């Protein structure tokens, strides 16, 4: 679909997209002594000024904002907290010098710019009686994904159009899809009762620059009230549509039909909203996305340990604390396993990532999805197409490049289990790659590059994980890297993906996960697994019972439709 576009300095609503003018940071004690901290952020290799995200922390753990040192600079302050430990306080800066008036003392100043740069960290003392101290921060780029044809996005964003140009460049995030419509009850449409105070912008692409863009018409249905009473169903997003949606939810089918006509994709948000497993069969897998890194995955400490742990089946054998609480690694694994179950039921739901930055204590694009441009050149239209077909991987840090039989994630290979080299059946557009020597073994090549140590790499075949030997470094600028080759012996059709885990200095997991490559074997279809199909069916059946006296007949029928789908899958399923 061809969309009109504009540069961000042009009109996008009744006015213009203007950089917000931030107030100067106040000193901790009004009237107390202050020292001016002055600084600049430049590339470690070329010395060019960089936009970045800046943290200023004193010895007590308190954070301070900074402001531009001159009129040409721009800054966006961010201050979000969940509980006592999950705190995100930073300033997003344009590529200009900054300053702040701070009480004397010792400070740690840190500049970060998304996952492709090594952070720059400086300790500085602001001495009593000094007028000013100066600091230079030099983040170092360790990988340039755009030069390799990969461009990043965040599909769950609550930042405003006014602040996004500054924030996106500070994070080097290529695509933002802000949820400019957001409704939370079943009786109103997003157009009638938008939780966002600003009017929905016109459907025109906003160009921050040639490779950083905003699509401003996106909608979140987050239903927590039904017919005026508290009753949580959950969230689902329509992304990349062109006009405000004038349907209340539930049922979901009318809004899906209209949004799909407008070119929308659909994002499930989280795997364990009460209604989440009803949505894939009802929406249909075409254009449906699953957040492998969702809005509970933060730079700050993990906080949502009690978010519906009752939905975790015993068969997943997840390490719940006390049997009742997630840790961060368990939360990630629960999402992965739920996605695998949907894939095994024939629902080709593609991976994505979203932060809900603007609501939660997390930087924009902390979890992000990278989409591959086949010709290497970025356009928004090609990026959306890649997201839709699964030409992607999701990351919270490491970079992961995988081919299966020389095909990239999101692509399909028709494979023969009995033919010799070169006799592999081909798609019309498939003109490369060779089969293994008559054994059905599919070759997999995995390249990992990371700023942090690589702890584990796993090959995922139809949801089953096999750990791969990592081996030594390869020639790359990245501090840590590996090249891994493997072969997969297949007996049936399959999907194949790879995931990798790295580790922060304090032991927290950072990961990357590719979308699948689909390997189709004639006459041997991929079949569901009994435990997975049964789990998905029970999730939906429990919702039918919970909603029996709450939802309309039309809304309940969608749950029954989903239950029928999973019941049929269970009847076809294989015993593990």
Image (cartoon, rainbow, N blue to C red):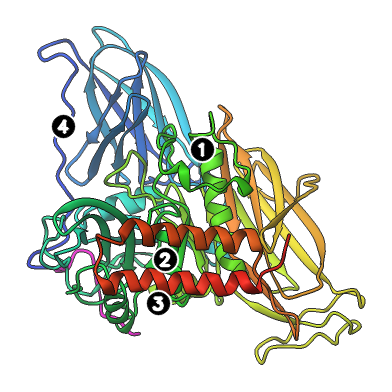
Q: Secondary structure at mark 1?
A: helix
Chain-order first, disc 1 or disc 2: 2
Q: Which residue is mark 4?
A: 24
Magenta residues span: 1-12
Tell me how far mark 3 sits from mark 2, CA to CA. Answer: 29 Å
Residues under numbered marks 1 and 2 in contact, where contact means CB atoms less than 8 Å apart: no
Residue 208 location (% of width, % of height): 30, 62
277 up-or-down from 423: above or below = above
Residue nearer the viewer, 396 or 447: 396
- Closest to the camera, between mark 4 and mark 1, is 1
Residue 205 is drawn in which quadrant? bottom left
Chain-order first, disc 4 or disc 3: 4
Residues under numbered marks 4 and 3 in contact, where contact means CB atoms less than 8 Å apart: no
- Closest to the camera, between mark 4 and mark 2, is 2
Q: Which residue is mark 2?
A: 278
Residue 59 is drawn in which quadrant? top left
Residue at 14 percent of width and 65 percent of height: 188
Check residue 381 in the rendering and tell me which mark sits there, or answer none.
3
Apparent side of residue 343 relative to residue 486 in the rendered image (left or right): left
Q: Which residue is mark 1?
A: 328
Instruction: Name the image quarter holding the N terminus.
Output: bottom left
Chain-order first, disc 4 or disc 1: 4
Residue at 21 percent of width and 61 percent of height: 180
Instruction: Work out which residue is located at the far left of the displayed protein and give it.
Output: 14
Q: Secondary structure at mark 4?
A: loop
- Closest to the camera, between mark 1 and mark 2, is 2
Tell me how far mark 4 sits from mark 3, CA to CA. Answer: 39 Å
Residue at 44 percent of width and 62 percent of height: 540
Tell me how far mark 1 sits from mark 2, CA to CA. Answer: 25 Å
């Amino acid at each position: 679909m061809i969309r009109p576009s504009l540069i961000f300095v042009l009109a996008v609503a009744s006015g213009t997209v203007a950089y917000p003018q931030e107030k100067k940071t106040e000193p901790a004690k009004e009237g107390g002594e202050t020292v001016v901290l002055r600084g600049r952020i430049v590339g470690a290799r070329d010395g060019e000024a960089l936009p970045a995200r800046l943290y200023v922390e004193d010895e007590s753990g308190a954070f301070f904002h900074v402001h531009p040192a001159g009129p040409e600079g721009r800054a966006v302050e961010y201050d979000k907290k969940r509980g006592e430990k999950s705190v995100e306080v930073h300033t997003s800066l344009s590529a200009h010098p900054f300053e702040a008036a701070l009480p004397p003392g010792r400070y740690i100043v840190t500049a970060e710019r998304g996952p492709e740069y090594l952070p720059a960290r400086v300790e500085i003392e602001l001495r009593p009686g000094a007028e000013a101290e100066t600091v230079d921060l030099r983040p170092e780029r360790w990988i340039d994904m755009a030069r390799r044809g990969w461009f990043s996005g965040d599909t769950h964003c609550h930042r405003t159009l006014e602040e996004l140009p500054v924030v996106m460049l500070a994070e080097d995030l290529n695509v933002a899809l802000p949820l400019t419509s957001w409704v939370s009850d079943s009786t109103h449409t997003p157009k009638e009762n938008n939780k966002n105070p600003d009017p929905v912008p016109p459907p025109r692409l906003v160009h921050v620059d040639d490779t950083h863009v905003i699509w401003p018409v996106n909608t979140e249905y987050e239903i927590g009230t039904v017919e005026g009473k508290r009753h949580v169903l959950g969230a689902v997003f329509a992304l990349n549509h062109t006009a405000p949606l004038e349907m209340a939810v539930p049922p979901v089918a009318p809004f899906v039909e209209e949004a799909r006509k407008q070119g929308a994709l659909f994002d499930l948000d989280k795997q364990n909203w009460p209604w989440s497993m009803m949505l894939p069969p009802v929406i249909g897998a075409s254009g449906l996305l699953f957040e492998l890194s969702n809005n509970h995955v933060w730079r700050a400490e993990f906080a949502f340990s009690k978010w519906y742990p009752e939905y975790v089946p015993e068969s997943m054998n997840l390490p719940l604390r006390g049997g009742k609480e997630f840790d961060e690694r368990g939360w990630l694994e629960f999402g992965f396993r739920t996605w695998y179950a949907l894939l095994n039921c024939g629902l080709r739901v593609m991976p994505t990532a979203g932060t809900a930055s603007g609501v939660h204590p997390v930087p924009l694009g902390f979890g992000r999805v990278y989409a591959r441009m086949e010709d290497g050149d970025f356009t928004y239209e090609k990026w959306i197409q890649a997201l839709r077909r699964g030409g992607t991987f999701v990351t919270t840090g490491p970079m992961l490049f995988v081919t299966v039989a020389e095909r990239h994630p999101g692509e399909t290979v028709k494979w023969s289990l009995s033919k010799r080299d070169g006799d592999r059946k081909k798609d019309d557009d498939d003109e490369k790659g060779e089969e293994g020597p008559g054994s059905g073994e599919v070759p997999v090549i995995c390249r990992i590059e990371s700023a942090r140590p690589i702890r584990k790499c796993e090959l995922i075949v139809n949801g089953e994980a096999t750990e791969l030997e990592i081996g030594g470094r390869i020639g790359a600028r990245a501090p840590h890297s590996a090249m891994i080759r493997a072969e997969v012996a297949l007996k049936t059709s399959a999907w194949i993906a790879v995931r990798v885990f790295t580790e922060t200095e304090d032991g927290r997991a950072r990961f990357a996960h590719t979308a699948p490559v689909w390997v189709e074997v004639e006459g041997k279809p991929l079949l569901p697994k009994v435990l997975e199909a049964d789990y998905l069916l029970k999730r939906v059946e429990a919702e039918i019972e919970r909603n029996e006296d709450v939802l309309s007949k039309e809304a309940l029928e969608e749950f029954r439709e989903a239950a029928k789908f999973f019941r049929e899958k269970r009847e076809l399923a294989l015993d593990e």
